[in-house]
Image: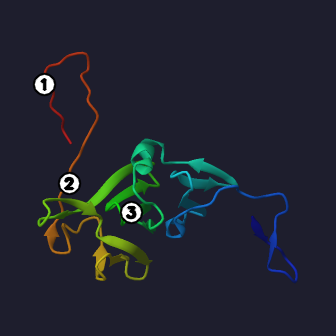
């Protein structure tokens, strides 16, 4: 842990303060809301609270443990979301920092009739324009906005999955979204 020290040295090491945790995926480290988030060596996503690492990936840990490789994981921060993509396994997990929940993003590919990881790789927020610019996995640039109804010209498909609730009866239930 380093801190800003007044005087001749700009930063100084805070003696006795360290975190015994690293990452096999250096591109998974993101600074968000004055804290750091990263994928650690145990395949857990960690959020640093002060100097205390806190696991935030409990709901998706089984999926993270079953990945073939995590060393190529790449993360970006966009619209208060930590977006973590795994190119080898072709999957993207997203943590909403405000709502504190995980979701999975993907791109529907007609040629394989299935989902692949999200089209984005990196992003930058341009406050002057009020836009997020996304660098895509195929080398293209995209504009991100929650109200844009397409993804690189393709209609955005949504799929909501929920756990089973029987509410004490096995009769049909209707859900209003």
Coloration of the structure image: rainbow
Q: Residue furthest top?
A: 168
The quadrant of the image that shows the N terminus is bottom right
Q: Mark 2 points at which residue?
A: 158
* Camera-side mark, 3 or 2: 3
Q: Earlier in the sequence, mark 2 or mark 1?
A: 2
Numbered circle sitting on residue 86: 3
Image-quadrant location for residue 4: bottom right
Q: Earlier in the sequence, mark 3 or mark 1?
A: 3
- Callout 3: SS: strand
Q: Residues within 10 Å of mark 1 (few under 14, many from 20)?
A: few
Q: Mark 1 points at which residue?
A: 172
Left/right of residue 158 with respect to residue 140 in the rendered view: left
C-alpha gap between disc 3 and disc 2: 20 Å
Q: Residues within 10 Å of mark 3 (few under 14, many from 20)?
A: many
> What percent of the width, then of the height, locates residue 140?
28, 82
> What percent of the width, then of the height, locates residue 54?
60, 48
Numbered circle sitting on residue 101: none
């Amino acid at each position: 842990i380093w801190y800003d020290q007044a005087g001749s040295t700009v930063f100084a090491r805070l003696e006795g303060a360290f975190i015994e945790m690293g990452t096999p995926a250096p591109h998974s480290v993101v600074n968000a809301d004055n804290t750091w988030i990263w994928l650690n060596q145990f395949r857990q996503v960690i959020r640093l609270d002060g100097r205390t690492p806190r696991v935030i990936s409990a709901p998706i840990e089984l999926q993270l443990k079953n990945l073939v490789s995590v060393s190529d994981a790449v993360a970006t921060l966009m619209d208060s979301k930590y977006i973590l993509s795994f190119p080898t396994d072709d999957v993207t997990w997203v943590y909403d920092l405000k709502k504190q929940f995980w979701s999975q993003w993907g791109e529907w590919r007609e040629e394989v009739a299935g989902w692949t990881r999200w089209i984005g790789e990196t992003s930058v927020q341009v406050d002057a324009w009020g836009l997020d610019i996304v660098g895509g996995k195929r080398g293209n640039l995209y504009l991100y906005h929650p109200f844009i109804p397409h993804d690189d010209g393709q209609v955005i498909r949504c799929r909501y999955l929920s756990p089973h609730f029987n509410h004490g009866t096995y009769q049909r239930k209707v859900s209003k979204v």
